[in-house]
């Protein structure tokens, strides 16, 4: 369902509503952001960042508010569950085996830029 919505929007983005930031701008944003909390930053640098700042992985980019808003519609609980179990191209725990729920939630909020870091 959400995959369809995402595809629909991609199709639209290629035609009529191509008004958001370019992929290059999104990648620059993703690469410039880091969590202000040192503990989250340490985890982010060794796990999430390796995929969520690269276009080729297909992961929603850090700071790509539009991409994340589509994900957030599932609800934070579902997102959390998908991180823990793995989801499509994302391995279980987003490759952070020692992360706890609070840290995962903090990382999701950071990547979606829900809280200004
Ligand atoms: C090996 C690459 C990789 C790593 C490491 C990774 N992710 Fe992901 N993540 C992905 C990909 C790819 C997707 C998109 C999957 C899809 O929708 O096809 C994704 C999607 C997500 C989603 C959205 C899930 C959904 O239900 O739409 C969340 C939340 C997420 N990642 C959080 C994290 C967090 C937090 C970390 C670090 C602890 C992390 N990821 C590390 C590759 C990764």
Image: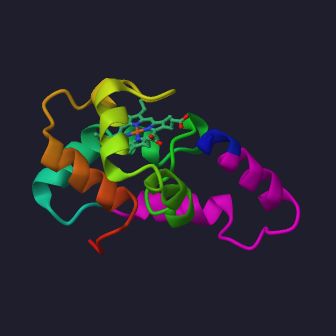
Q: Residue at x 76, y 50 (%)?
A: 8
Magenta part mainly helix, strand or loop?
helix
- Percent position of residue 12, x then y: 81, 59
The C terminus, quarter of image: bottom left
Residue at 37% over, 67% down:
113
- Left or right of 69 in this view: 79: left
Q: In this view of the protein, which residue sits in the foreground, 113 or 7?
A: 7
Query: Is 6 placed above or below 92 here?
Result: below
User: Residue 33's spot in the image, x, y percent?
Assistant: 36, 64
User: Where are the magenta residues, as a range?
Assistant: 5-33
Look at the image and tell me in which quarter the N terminus lies: top right
Q: Nearer the viewer, residue 116 or 49?
A: 116
Q: Is residue 62 left or right of residue 13?
A: left
Task: Name the quadrant containing residue 52.
Answer: top left
Rendered image coloring scheme? rainbow
Assess whether residue 30 is covered by the magenta stretch: yes
Q: How many marks?
A: 0
Residue 93 position, x and y percent, is: 28, 30
Identify which residue is drawn at 27% across, 47% down: 44
Q: Is residue 78 left or right of residue 89?
A: left
Q: Quadrant of ligand 1?
A: top left
Examine the image and state in which quarter residue 46 appears. top left
Q: Nearer the viewer, residue 24 or 7?
A: 7
Q: Whole-percent x and y of residue 97?
A: 19, 27
Query: Is 111 situated above or below 101?
Result: below
When the figure is inspected, residue 97 is found, relative to residue 19, above or below; the finding is: above
Q: Where 33 falls versus 56 (above or below)? A: below
| In magenta segment, residue 12 | yes
């Amino acid at each position: 369902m959400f995959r369809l919505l995402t595809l629909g929007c991609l199709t639209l983005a290629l035609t009529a509503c191509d008004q958001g930031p370019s992929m290059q701008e999104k990648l620059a944003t993703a690469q410039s952001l880091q969590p202000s909390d040192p503990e989250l930053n340490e985890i982010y640098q060794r796990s999430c960042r390796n995929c969520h700042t690269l276009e080729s992985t297909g992961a929603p980019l850090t700071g790509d508010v539009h991409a994340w808003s589509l994900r957030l519609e599932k609800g934070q609980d579902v997102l959390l569950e998908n991180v823990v179990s793995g989801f499509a191209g994302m391995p279980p725990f987003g490759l952070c085996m020692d992360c706890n729920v609070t840290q995962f939630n903090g990382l999701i909020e950071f990547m979606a830029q829900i809280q200004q870091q």
